Image (cartoon, grey):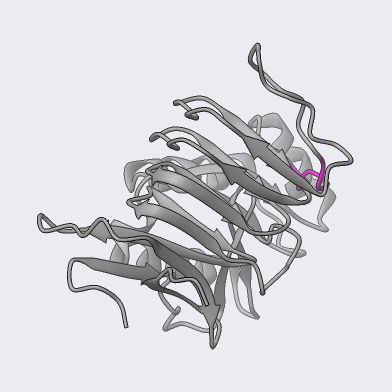
Amino acid sequence: MMPDDARVSSMPTAVDRRVQIKGIREGLLVTFGEGEWSELRAALLTYIEEQATFFKGARLAIDVGNHIIHAAEMGSLRDRLSDLGVSLWAVLSSSPVTERTAQVLGLATCLPSPRLERPSRRGETDLEGENAVLVQRTLRSGYRLSTRGHVVVIGEVNPGAEIYAGGSVVVWGRLRGTVHAGTEGNTAAVICALEMAPVQLRIADQVAVIQTGKRRKTEPMMARLENGQIVLEPWKSK
């Protein structure tokens, strides 16, 4: 059972089944069902407006299939999303016209292949080839750690720090940043911390935002997948 002072807000389910949204490493990916583009666009915007708290600050990639979208219309959608606090960064399409339109507007037209990013700061380590990574330091804002294996941090993960792991993530300290475990679809991955107060958690393709109240408990917590949803429970040795 989850503690009274913590709430896991998983990705809301779309009422309109023509709009499907899932978490990816780079943000959120939207795919559409059948229908006219004008109707699909309206359905997406309505969905985001109804779930404004969840989508605030999100990075969005949309897969529009073979719909032909010209510059004015795509620019209008980008601006409307921006008004809602959502950043449109990529448009995927099988239409050459739509693809060129996205490129003209400076938007990506494909998702990056999974890869290990090279360190961006002095003192970070190239993680390629490791099954598990041990970090004995506090990860501060701007630090991005990525590996296909597990991650163990002895220290804190501050807001603005990000961890991406193909396996599980254990933080022997306070977790206040962003963590994505099971990045390659590992639904058995878990996220554990001595104090759980993150900006965002992800496990495989599921996303959760944890909001803590004033009476925050500091007991160790574990996040895991159960029935396709992220649940939070006390982290206890077995």
Q: Is residue 235 left or right of residue 100?
A: left
* Residue in view at x 49 percent, y 34 percent: 161
Predominant SS of the magenta segment: loop
Which residue is more in the foreground, 118 or 224? 224
Where in the figure is residue 222, as x and y percent of width and height?
45, 66
* Residue in view at x 52 percent, y 77 percent: 238
Q: Residue furthest top?
A: 122
Q: Quadrant of the N terminus?
A: bottom left
Which residue is more in the foreground, 61 or 68? 61
Q: Residue furthest front?
A: 238
- Count of all numbered marks drawn on residues in the image: 0
- Residue interval drawn in magenta: 109-115
The reply to whether residue 24 is visible in this rendering is yes
Q: Is residue 9 above or below residue 54?
A: below
Q: Is residue 20 above or below residue 102?
A: below
Asked where in the image residue 105 lies, by quadrant, the reply is top right
* Residue in view at x 85 percent, y 37 percent: 128
The reply to whether residue 77 is visible in this rendering is no
Q: Is residue 234 left or right of residue 37?
A: left
Q: Is residue 149 above or below residue 140?
A: below
Q: Residue furthest bottom?
A: 227
Q: Is residue 235 magenta?
A: no
Q: Residue furthest right?
A: 129
Where in the figure is residue 122, as x and y percent of width and height?
65, 11
Asked where in the image residue 135 lies, by quadrant, the reply is top right
